[in-house]
Amino acid sequence: MIKVSAPSNIALIKYWGKRDRALNLPLTSSLSITLSSLISEATVEESTGSEDLWDIMGDPSKSQRVLAAARKDLGDHRPLKISIVNHFPSGAGLASSASSMAALALALSQFLGSGEVPLQQIATWSRLGSGSSVRSLLPGYVLWEAGTDPEGKDCLVRQLHPASHLPLSLVVCVVNDQPKHIGSTAAMERCRDTSPIYDGFHQRNDADLQLAQEALVQGDLLTLGRVAEANCLAMHNVMHQAIPPVDYFMPGTHEAIALTRQLRANGVPCFFTIDAGPNVKIFCSPEYQEVVSQACRALPGLVGILEDRLGLSYEELLTK
Ligand code: 2P0
């Protein structure tokens, strides 16, 4: 039996559109931070019956795509028993599909491939379950390159910097911990088909990504935070202009955005980002985590707060 865990990741420059749906290839590159404690755990063992047994929350189709890809590459078709547990709310825009698909792909690489499978190949399996999951395979600041190859040969994931380069803490304002009303894939497709600013969002990607990468090299959190906020709001504008609109925001979302701006005006350098859900992730240097978290506790529209940090090394990621 193999048990592997993988952390969630949060994009600072977002992935919001595919160039190939079947292969889950992104239109543009994205940049993320890999967390430490918001994790999913995948267990793989041989099934005693003649069919695969699944013990996972929700629809197994994403996991089945990951398993099919691993089996095809490794030629091992033994029936398996697979369970996946998310140690934080699932399907609520906290990237549980990213951590769970990354954990599953890693577990399969160990169980079926004896740990000998190259990272980019594991990423290919994981990507078929959830595009953004490839970024959870590496710690620190991670770049997922879109590439142009129709089969995705140059759609690669790589670490830009370890977490220690620019340590960050994260305070997640949980506005709603229930599964979202529309999944990411369907929401991206509605945006592609109906939002007049979908193409514009992807055209600005290069500039945002370059600015973010330069800011990272300089250790310039202010510039990184500003471009991350702008990129996040641009992505949500794309959604808000879709027909019908994809609107993940709730009253607590607006409260947390306003609080972040107010804290910043009061000298606390913190920044927000929001994914496909209403929950707001506020990031800051570790020394400001407590003041941010205290301020968030006073917001009436939240159902909870989660705290995490960047911090895993390669070794921790693989052994956690
Ligand atoms: C991201 N999100 O870059 C963006 C920002 C949500 C908002 O990647 O369709 O569940 O399975 O590839 O991986 C959501 O991602 O989507 C996502 P699919 P996935 O983090």
Image (spheres, rainbow, N blue to C red):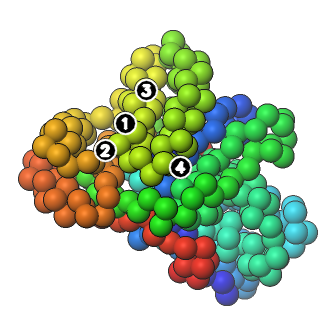
Circle 4 SS class:
helix
* Dot 4 or dot 1, earlier in sequence: 4
Q: CA distance from mark 4 to mark 1?
A: 15 Å
* Dot 1 or dot 3, earlier in sequence: 1
The answer to whether 295 appears left or right of 286 in the picture is left
Q: Which residue is mark 2?
A: 271
Circle 1 SS class:
helix
Circle 2 SS class:
strand
Callout 3, which amino acid?
Ala
Q: Which residue is mark 1?
A: 226
Residue 234: mark in rendering: 3
Residue 217: mark in rendering: 4
CB atoms at circles 1 and 2 under 8 Å apart?
Answer: yes
* Dot 4 or dot 2, earlier in sequence: 4
Q: Which residue extends farthest top?
A: 196
Judge whether residue 30 can be spotted in this image.
Answer: yes
Circle 3 SS class:
helix
The residue depicted at 60 percent of the width and 79 percent of the height is 315
* Dot 3 or dot 2, earlier in sequence: 3
Callout 1, which amino acid?
Arg
Q: Position of residue 83 (x, y in %)?
A: 58, 73
- Label 4: few (<14), some (14–19) or many (≥20) C-alpha neighbours in 10 Å: few
The residue depicted at 67 percent of the width and 87 percent of the height is 1
CB atoms at circles 4 and 1 under 8 Å apart?
Answer: no
The answer to whether 139 appears left or right of 107 in the picture is left
